[in-house]
Image (cartoon, rainbow, N blue to C red):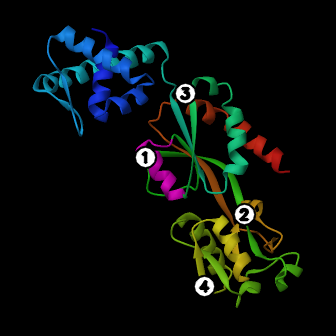
Amino acid sequence: MELRHLRYFVAVVETGSLTVAARKLHTSQPSLSRQIRDLEQEIGAQLLTRRARGIELTPAGRAFLEHARSVLSQVKAAADAARRVAHPAKPCFTMGFLTGHELTWMPEALQILRDELPSIDVMISSQLSPQLANALLKGTVDAAFLRHERGVPELAFRPLVKEPLVVILPSDHRLAALTAISPRDLVGETFVGVSDTAPVLRAVIDNYLKTSGVKIKPQHEVDHVVMGVSLIASTGAVGLFPAYAQNFLTPAVTSRPLKGDSPTVDLVLGYKKSNQSPALKLLVSRLDELVARVSKKSR
């Protein structure tokens, strides 16, 4: 008895047809029938009967089926175990990016990790900042480019850059004629704000408007800058967003700096303090180089 006899027998049972099983096994029906007969002769019992509606198991066949499946399962497990020893699976390193920052930071981060790449599989995740912090806590993300979220003492945050806020507005908007825009210029305009899904950025914007002495109630709220740029283009509204939003401007949308000292929002690298990933240690140890690379590229 050989393993192929067991595989052929199980295939016939699962398909209920010699013809279908033969196609599935890439063999001829006569050859398959002969293999089944050889198996029955080896066992000394009839395993299958032909009926008008297809193949049926005999009582002996039902008893044999369970053991045949068990043997095939054990053989597969043994082969898988051998393969794992011979070809160990690469550890996975997952980097998370605040939606929109992949364009700027991912290529340079991968360049930093290039020496580790042959021995690891890198996964990329794009999410909102609070979601990234939660993923870091759960261990589904190893390192994330996000905001400095509060209330997560298990996480470490390393500063990367301070992103200034800019005004995003339609290219044909009357304020686009200005070289710089003050908060008071925004009063009375349809305003696109940031939702609670981006609490750190929202707090920076709200505090800036409050300290500037203006009251602006958003008519729309968005989760991230890509959505904000799209909404501004379609509604003719204006909004305050970090400068990286300029990466997503279309000809219909432009940006202007704020007058005076522009408020900033921090972008940081976050990771779980207990994470011992060698790739994470490498990335953290070369953060200064990473920031320098991105700064040079953006000039």
Q: Is residue 116 left or right of residue 20?
A: right
- Numbered circle sitting on residue 137: 1
Per the rendering, the mark at residue 245 is: 2
For mark 3, what is the residue? 278
* Looking at the image, residue 237 lies above or below residue 284: below
Q: Nearer the viewer, mark 3 or mark 2?
A: 2
Picture layout, residue 104 above or below residue 237: above
- Tell me where the magenta segment starts and ends, as one range: 129-141
Mark closer to the chain start, 1 or 3: 1
Q: Nearer the viewer, residue 156 or 55?
A: 55
Q: Secondary structure at mark 3?
A: helix
Q: Earlier in the sequence, mark 1 or mark 4?
A: 1
User: Quadrant location of the N terminus?
Assistant: top left
User: Helix or strand or loop: what does disc 4 sit on?
Assistant: loop
Is disc 4 surrounded by few (<14), some (14 to 19) or many (20+) residues within 10 Å? Answer: few
Q: Report x, y in % for residue 237.
A: 71, 82
Q: Are marks 2 and 1 in contact (CB under 8 Å)?
A: no
Q: Picture coordinates of residue 24 (x, y %)?
A: 41, 30
Asked whether the residues under the numbered discs 1 and 3 touch, taking CB atoms below 8 Å apart as contact, a structural biologist would say no
Distance in Å between CA atoms under marks 4 and 3: 47 Å
Image quadrant in which you'd find residue 127: bottom right
Q: Which residue is mark 4?
A: 219
| Residue 238 in sight in this render | no
The amino acid marked with disc number 4 is: Gln
Q: Of tags 1 and 4, which is closer to the observer?
A: 4
Q: How far apart are the alpha carbons under marks 2 and 1?
A: 28 Å
